[in-house]
Image (cartoon, helix red, strand yellow):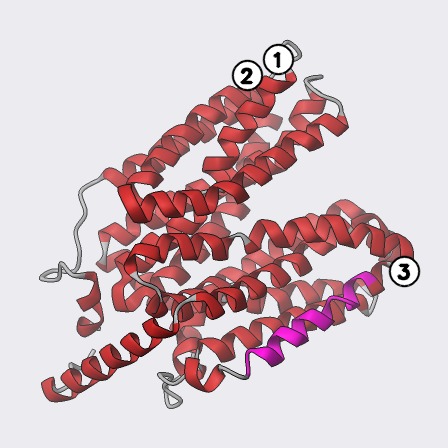
């Protein structure tokens, strides 16, 4: 692209530096709460459909198992919206884009609650249009206001919104369905979505002061984050690793209960407890990993360790049998949860660090890769089981992929020719 005049570029950098210093003084906590709310409410809306699947299936006349298609559509459309979100953030601002996420969430809930098969299907697309922007919005708002020594912790706290939203859906939606019907259980969630949308209007002018209203918003803008795969080997390797890690996480989640019950390792109640231990371990460990990455090891070294340990946990999970004690099963679930579910916060911290001034694009690329892993790897895992390999082979394959992700992160890194500082990448684009 055309290089800016040196004087203009210098003024822009000086203004950006002054803005960053002012933003840093304001601290990351208000944007953290806002973006944590965005992630929690959007995720709760998505996972309300599986939580209410039996009643929704009866209400619209389809098999409840088809709810899996709903989630796949959300993540599939979410990949596109993640890649488009940097362009939207540049034109409208991160706060306004976050408000759009809540508008899409409310639109999904209203459309699905209208009660027909066609509208439920359309609601998945509506939610996906906003869902992919959650992490890029958070990065754009949080990183400039966060000291480098806090970044992994703050982004790890923000990532708690994913399991928190899923937990709230599991705890609150079934009682609401039984008491008031599935449509009401969806529609009532519109209230907090609109409350957060309105609250974000107050800081919007300040948070979006650096937006560029003249910037174009085009479909080809989705290609901008993808260019990092070509120009930055470190980002490419991290993208590959997080694609694998996210997919392995969903393999554990999707198949753990089925594996434990089918193999007579545990009854349904205990299998559910094992899955809960996996999820809770991921939630509790995220901020812990963030602190460790900030103070001692750095995120990349921890991500390598995560890959190796989750590979060991996968191998152990593949060996579950009736001879295993339940405490031993819970130990494996704890180790798997702290790694395969606990990595996302420090992964986003590393995307932000490597991206420099392109951190929003790097985060968008990371989100799209994780969504793709969630869609692809569990299907391959299921095919491996159905083809006769059984759980040991399927989990063994997952272990190999986890090690491959770790090895990618220790491969030699190469940036754009002549650029070694991630904060300077923007000057060449």
**Residue 344 shown left or right of residue 383 in the figure:** left
**Residue 421: x %, y % from top left:** 16, 61
Residue 36 sits above or below residue 62 on the image: below
Residue at the spot of label 1: 324
Q: CA distance from mark 1 to mark 3?
A: 42 Å
Q: Is residue 181 left or right of residue 400?
A: right
Residue placed under numbered mark 2 in the picture: 319
Specify the quadrant that holds the N terminus: bottom left
Dot 3 crowding, Cα within 10 Å, few <14, some 14–19, many 20+: few
Q: How many marks?
A: 3
Q: Which mark is residue 219?
A: none
Q: Position of residue 201 (x, y in %)?
A: 55, 83
Q: CA distance from mark 1 to mark 2?
A: 9 Å
Q: Secondary structure at mark 1?
A: loop
Report the magenta residues as a range: 185-201
- Taking the image as shown, residue 20 lies to the left or right of residue 286, namely left
> Residue 332 versus residue 91: which sits nearer the camera?
332
Query: Which one is earlier in the sequence, the residue at label 2 or at label 3?
Result: 3
List the residue tagged with mark 3.
Answer: 180
In the rendered image, residue 362, in percent from the top left (x then y), is placed at: 34, 61
In the orientation shown, which residue stands out farthest toward the bottom?
214
Is the C-beta separation of discs 1 and 2 under 8 Å?
yes
Q: Secondary structure at mark 2?
A: loop
Q: Nearer the viewer, mark 2 or mark 3?
A: 3
């Amino acid at each position: 692209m055309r290089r800016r005049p040196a004087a203009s570029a210098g003024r822009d950098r000086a203004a950006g530096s002054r803005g960053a210093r002012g933003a840093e003084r304001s601290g990351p906590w208000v944007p953290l709460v806002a973006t944590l709310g965005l992630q929690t409410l959007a995720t709760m809306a998505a996972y309300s459909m599986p939580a209410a699947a039996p009643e929704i299936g009866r209400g619209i006349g389809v098999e409840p198992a088809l709810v899996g298609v709903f989630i796949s559509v959300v993540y599939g459309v979410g990949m596109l919206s993640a890649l488009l979100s940097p362009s939207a953030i540049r034109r409208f601002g991160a706060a306004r884009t976050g408000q759009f996420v809540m508008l899409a969430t409310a639109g999904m809930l209203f459309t699905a609650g209208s009660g027909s098969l066609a509208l439920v299907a359309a609601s998945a697309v509506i939610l996906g249009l906003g869902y992919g922007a959650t992490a890029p919005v958070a990065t754009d708002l949080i990183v400039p206001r966060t000291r480098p020594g806090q970044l992994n912790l703050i982004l790890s706290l923000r990532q708690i919104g994913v399991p928190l939203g899923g937990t709230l859906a599991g705890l609150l939606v079934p009682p609401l369905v039984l008491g008031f019907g599935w449509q009401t259980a969806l529609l009532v969630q519109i209230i907090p979505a609109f409350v957060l949308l309105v609250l974000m209007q107050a800081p919007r002018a300040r948070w979006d002061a650096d937006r560029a209203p003249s910037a174009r918003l085009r479909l080809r803008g989705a290609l901008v984050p993808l260019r990092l795969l070509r120009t930055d080997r470190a980002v490419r390797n991290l993208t590959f690793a997080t694609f694998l890690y996210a997919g392995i996480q969903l393999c554990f989640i999707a198949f753990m209960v089925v594996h434990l019950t089918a193999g007579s390792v545990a009854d349904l109640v205990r299998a559910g407890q094992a899955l809960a231990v996996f999820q809770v371990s991921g939630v509790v460990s995220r901020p812990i990993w963030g602190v460790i990455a900030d103070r001692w090891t750095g995120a990349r070294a921890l991500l390598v360790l995560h890959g190796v340990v989750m590979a060991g946990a996968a191998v152990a999970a593949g060996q579950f049998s009736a001879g295993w004690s339940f405490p031993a099963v819970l130990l494996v679930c704890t180790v798997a949860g702290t790694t395969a579910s606990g990595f996302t916060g420090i992964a986003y911290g590393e995307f932000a660090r490597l991206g420099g001034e392109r951190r929003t694009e790097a985060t968008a690329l990371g989100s799209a890769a994780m969504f793709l892993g969630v869609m692809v790897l569990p299907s391959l895992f299921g095919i491996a089981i159905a083809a006769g390999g059984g759980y040991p082979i399927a989990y063994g394959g997952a272990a190999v992929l986890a090690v491959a992700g770790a090895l990618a992160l220790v491969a030699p890194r190469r940036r754009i020719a002549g650029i070694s500082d991630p904060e300077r990448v923007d000057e060449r684009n």
